[in-house]
């Protein structure tokens, strides 16, 4: 689906690919590790009617270049800061999934005055990852010399199908989304596992998100979890909600790690309703999910 214009942002000598569409208050979409900006195509098609929408390929993913390093959470936050500075965008709504959520929340923790609202889908934290399937990967990556293999390996098609299927809930599997070109894109590119290896090595840095309690005046938060998420723990996500105190908390019973594609209409509705609410009134200090 051709929904917007493909552009490039130069960051530390490397090209970061992004899409830009629509006009209005800005919304920035950040994908999870392993995917790319087009997982948000359905949401962008809807939000562009009332918002200026950006969707980025994080460095190492999608059409963005693969730097030799720079795959820590702090690196992604710095890239987002540079992107918004370059495009002179403040008062933005940030929408992320997994790594994209962690990047969004971390950015807002340091630049809350520049963020209007946060939509955190399956947020990656030390606790949500340690209770999910990725915990085993983190254990292995910390003990085995996987980095050289990650730089050279190109995954075969059947392995890509298994990886994607493991991220889906019952709804996504019924739709056979493991065959979706949007989800399969770039998984077979040589060296695409480098960014994942760097992310796993940096998992301890995500503990700061578990300890964060939003102060008064912090941007309103919406959390959304796929209850059948096997990559991160939705149960740990429910515990995280007690700390984050989101204005809106949604759980999709039959979705997994990729709800924006598994149930695009529902996810789009959650995002648009939340953003509409935050634009109508000044939100009070977060007081529990709804």
Image: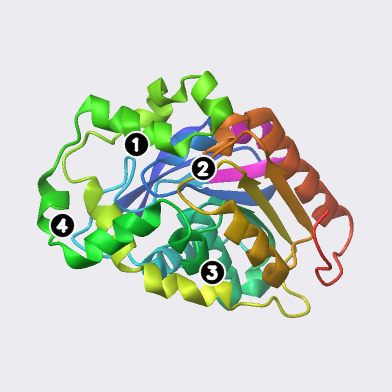
Left/right placement of residue 50 relative to residue 31 reads right
Q: Earlier in the sequence, mark 3 or mark 4?
A: 3
* Tag 2 residue: 257
State the separation of the CA atoms marked 3 and 4. 29 Å
Stretch in magenta: 42-54
Q: Nearer the viewer, mark 3 or mark 4?
A: 4
Q: Is residue 252 above or below residue 184?
A: below
Find residue 240 and report its image quarter.
Answer: bottom right
Q: Residues within 10 Å of mark 1 (few under 14, many from 20)?
A: some
What is the x, y in percent for residue 275?
Answer: 76, 49
Indicate the secondary structure of the residue bearing disc 3: helix
**Nearest the camera: 41 or 12?**
41
Q: Which mark is residue 163?
A: 1
**Nearest the camera: 42 or 279?**
42
State the separation of the CA atoms marked 2 and 3. 22 Å
Residue at the spot x=15%, y=57% of the render?
Answer: 146
Asked if the stretch drawn in magenta spans residue 147, the answer is no
Left/right placement of residue 195 relative to residue 47 reads left
* Tag 3 residue: 107
* Tag 4 residue: 146
What is the x, y in percent for residue 152?
Answer: 10, 46
Q: Residues within 10 Å of mark 2 (few under 14, many from 20)?
A: many
Indicate the secondary structure of the residue bearing disc 2: loop
State the separation of the CA atoms marked 4 and 2. 24 Å
């Amino acid at each position: 689906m051709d929904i917007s214009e493909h552009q490039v942002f130069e960051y530390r000598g490397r090209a970061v690919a992004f899409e830009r569409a629509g006009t209005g208050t800005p919304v920035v979409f950040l994908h999870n590790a392993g995917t790319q900006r087009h997982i948000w195509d359905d949401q962008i098609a809807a939000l562009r009617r009332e918002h200026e929408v950006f969707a980025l390929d994080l460095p190492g993913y999608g059409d963005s270049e693969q730097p030799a390093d720079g795959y820590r959470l702090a690196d992604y936050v710095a890239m987002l800061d540079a992107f918004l500075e370059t495009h002179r965008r403040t008062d933005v709504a940030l929408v992320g999934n997994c790594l994209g959520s962690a990047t969004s929340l971390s950015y807002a923790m340091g630049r809350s005055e520049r963020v209007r609202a946060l939509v955190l889908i399956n947020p990656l934290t030390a606790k949500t990852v340690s209770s999910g399937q990725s915990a085993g990967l983190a254990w292995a990556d910390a003990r085995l010399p996987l980095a050289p293999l990650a730089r050279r390996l190109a995954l075969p098609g059947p392995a890509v199908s298994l990886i994607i299927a493991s991220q889906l809930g019952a709804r996504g599997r019924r739709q056979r989304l493991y065959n979706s070109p949007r989800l399969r894109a770039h998984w077979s590119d040589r060296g695409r596992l480098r960014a994942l290896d760097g992310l796993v090595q940096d998992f301890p840095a995500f503990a700061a998100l578990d300890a964060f309690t939003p102060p008064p005046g912090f941007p309103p938060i919406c959390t959304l979890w796929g209850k059948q998420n096997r990559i991160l723990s939705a149960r740990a996500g429910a515990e995280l909600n007690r700390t984050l105190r989101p204005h809106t908390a949604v759980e999709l019973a039959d979705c997994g790690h990729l709800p924006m594609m598994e149930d695009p209409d529902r996810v789009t509705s959650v995002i648009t309703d939340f953003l509409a609410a935050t634009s109508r009134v000044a939100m009070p200090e977060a007081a529990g999910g709804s």
